Image: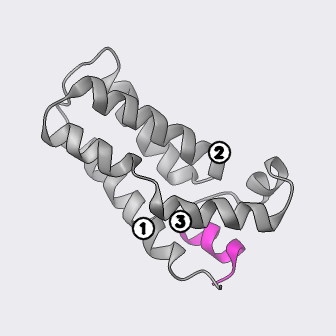
Amino acid sequence: MTLEQFYAAVGGDYEQTLSRLPSEALVKKFVLKYVDDGTCKELAEAITNRDWATAFRAAHTLKGIALNLGFDALYTVSSKLTESLRGDKPLTDMSLWAAVDEKHKQIVDAISQIDA
């Protein structure tokens, strides 16, 4: 899978991302590094432990990562989750977390298919 195909598969904007970063090689480097980012794991643990302050920070961080990398679908769902947790409010709609987790897994799976 090419990088452009990857972005189409995960609901991202390849051209917009390429306009923010100086080269396709740099975009690819950061996309591949996403697999090792622990933010989504931290978010899952915080939600499990009902640690809403940590969950908010992790959701907010994930939202920023998604925005910077052009993962538009992940950005959209992580934004909704972030806003639901703002002010350390407890998460009352677990479907918001489920949507983030689903998009994250979709991205990780698609990254494994990017041409080396």
Q: Which quadrant of the figure has residue 54?
A: top left
SS of the residue under disc 2: helix
Label ID, residue 90: none
Q: Is residue 21 above or below residue 14?
A: above
Work out how far the residue at label 3 is from the one at label 2, CA to CA, in angstroms: 15 Å
Tell me if mark 2 has few (under 14), some (14-19) or many (20+) residues whose alpha carbon lies within 10 angstroms of its own.
some
User: Image height check: is 60 above or below 74?
Assistant: above
Q: Are marks 3 and 1 in contact (CB under 8 Å)?
A: yes
In this view, the mark in front (2 or 1): 2
Can you tell which mark lies on residue 106?
A: 1
| Quarter that holds the C terminus | bottom right
Read off the residue under disc 2: 68
Quadrant including the N terminus: bottom right
Q: Nearer the viewer, mark 3 or mark 2?
A: 2
Q: What residue is at 50 percent from the left and 39 percent from the top?
A: 63
Residue at left offset 35%, top offset 35%: 81
